[in-house]
Amino acid sequence: MAVDPTFTSHPSAISPHHHQHTPPIPALQDPCSGDDDDDDDDEQVDEDDEDDCLYDEQQDLFQNELPDFTSSTSSFNRMQRRTSVSAESMTPSSREHRFIKTVVPKSAAQHDRIQSAIQTNFLFRHLDEMQYKDVINAMTEKQVEPGETVIQQGAVGDFFYIVESGHLDCYIDQERVTTYQAGGSFGELALMYNSPRAATIVATTRCVLWALDRVMFRGILMEHTSAKRRMYESFLTDVPILASLDAYERYKIADALESVAFEDGQTVIEQNAVGNNFYLIESGVAVFYKMDANGVQREVNRLTKGAYFGELALLNDSPRAATVIAEGRLRCATLGKKGFNRLLGPVLDILKRSSINYVKVMQSASE
Ligand SMILES: Nc1ncnc2c1ncn2[C@@H]1O[C@@H]2COP(=O)(O)O[C@H]2[C@H]1O
């Protein structure tokens, strides 16, 4: 199947995936020649060279066929052969104004299936309508058999994957580090950092995956993802409750976090309300109040940067146990209920144990 992307700065002018009406690719000056395998030079590439090199990569994409996703080895072999990864910066940055949009025709049913696969994935949450449409247009369906290797550790990365259905295991050096199911995604690291694949991903059941090529991933999904990971990297490293997580687990939490600010005196949580969010304090002071037997609000606790709250209602499916009010400006990173359960799984036991003591402290303070 040939790729027929159209070079255009006007999204509305995206061509369908057919051979006719393909505009000629302009002649290239080959600013990247000799750089293909020279990673050491990557960081020195200036903006203009970078853009031209990206353009070279698009020429490469244009001239090559999309991998045949029906065979287990084809995309892997292709990745091995295609060592001419262009000299892009090691720091992820957007080139949305220049990239060629891939359009793979698909049925209305396929559109719907992609939408439901990505709707629970945090990486797609910030996309505007046009970016969302571009991502869906570019995705290619990949059917995978049990036991099939989708990504091989150490290989060159061409695609980012979303799981529509099925289960996969992720191994680093033969050790299983995580699993994926519907709504999960993987394969972003090699595309973001031009690095070899960090892990091997093997299907444990029949799977349907949607693959997004590196140009589309870098053009649409990368900037926001890497900015968020950078933004929360050092903060999450310093949060005591997350100390036992590895760097990649903290990345996944960063993907899911939303930052929210409260002004002085604003209520963050109301006692007895239904709880939907978990909070990590980025800055400021959160003051905790409980109603005593006489209906008087009493201060029971105050927390600052690096502390967390809001976990009790989520852990126990119970109403909020206290009211939380901002003192001065309070900024928190929040996780919804699903993200809380899925991403904090490794520390839920610690959270539960800590919350028992915390409840005792709160209770005695309000008596
Ligand atoms: N602990 C981990 N470290 C690195 N990559 C991981 C880890 N767990 C899952 N992965 C995923 O495995 C993928 C392998 O390909 P990539 O390196 O492109 O991107 C990687 C991540 O999406």
Image (cartoon, grey):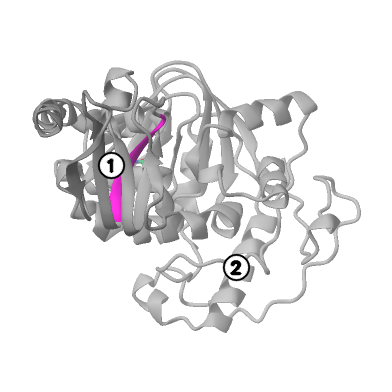
The answer to whether residue 238 is above or below residue 295 is: below
Q: Position of residue 272 (x, y in %)?
A: 36, 25
Q: Which residue is mark 2?
A: 95
Q: Residue at x 39, y 72 (%)?
A: 38
Ligand 1: quadrant of the figure: top left
Q: Position of residue 112 (x, y in %)?
A: 70, 27
Residue 6 is one of the magenta-drawn residues: no
Kind of residue at disc 2: Arg
Label 1, ligand 1: CB separation under 8 Å: yes
Q: Position of residue 207 (x, y in %)?
A: 51, 21
Q: Residue at x 36, y 56 (%)?
A: 331
Q: How many marks?
A: 2
Q: Secondary structure at mark 2?
A: loop
Disc sitting over residue 249 in the figure: 1
Disc sitting over residue 225 in the figure: none
- Is residue 146 in view? yes
Q: Secondary structure at mark 1?
A: helix
Q: Residue at x 51, y 49 (%)?
A: 158
The answer to whether residue 75 is above or below residue 231 is: above
Residue 277 is one of the magenta-drawn residues: yes
Split into 4 quadrants, where in the image is the C terminus? top left
Split into 4 quadrants, where in the image is the N terminus? top right
Q: On the rendered structure, is 130 left or right of 146?
A: right
Q: Position of residue 32 (x, y in %)?
A: 53, 77
